[in-house]
Image (tube, helix red, strand yellow):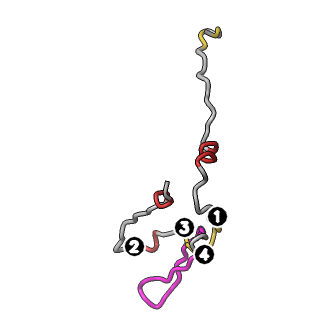
Amino acid sequence: MDLAYNRICICLQVVDNLNLTGLDRAYVCSAISPTKVFLTHCALKLKKSGSIVPRMELVEVGPSMDLVIRRNRLPNDSLMKEAMRTSKDKPKKKVLNNIKV
């Protein structure tokens, strides 16, 4: 299995007009380096500006995470098979009138 198949592709819609007063929160995802990703939750504050469009500021309000990608290759087949193994559940016996059949 190639690592290229495991990448996530996010396709977003292009927006021409946006009502800034309707925005309250934003999740910011920044790729700092090829192995580091920074996630944070921010609130949007509207400030006065010299033009019609207000100035927006991001204020960190929620949790933030620094994610580090340490594994850059897949494990060997035997280790993958052992990690993906699940227990076999026995089917439940039918109970009729509190008597096991």
Report x, y in % for residue 79: 63, 47
Quadrant of the rendered image containing residue 99: top right
User: Are dots 3 and 2 in contact, CB under 8 Å?
Assistant: no
Give the class, few, some or many, for how many residues have Cα within 10 Å of label 2's Cα (few <14, many ≥20): few
Query: Residue type at mark 2?
Result: Leu
Q: Nearer the viewer, mark 3 or mark 2?
A: 3
| Separation (CA) of disc 4 from disc 3 | 11 Å
- Vertical side of 78 occupied by 22: above or below: below
Query: Residue type at mark 3?
Result: Tyr
Most common secondary structure along the magenta stretch: strand
The mark nearer the N terminus, 4 or 3, is: 3
- Vertical side of 70 occupied by 16: above or below: below
The mark nearer the N terminus, 4 or 2, is: 2
Give the class, few, some or many, for how many residues have Cα within 10 Å of label 4's Cα (few <14, many ≥20): few
User: Are dots 1 and 3 in contact, CB under 8 Å?
Assistant: no
Callout 2: SS: loop
Report x, y in % for residue 69: 62, 65
Q: Which residue is mark 2?
A: 18
User: Are dots 4 and 1 in contact, CB under 8 Å?
Assistant: no
Give the tally of numbered discs.
4
Report x, y in % for residue 19: 41, 72
Give the class, few, some or many, for how many residues have Cα within 10 Å of label 1's Cα (few <14, many ≥20): few
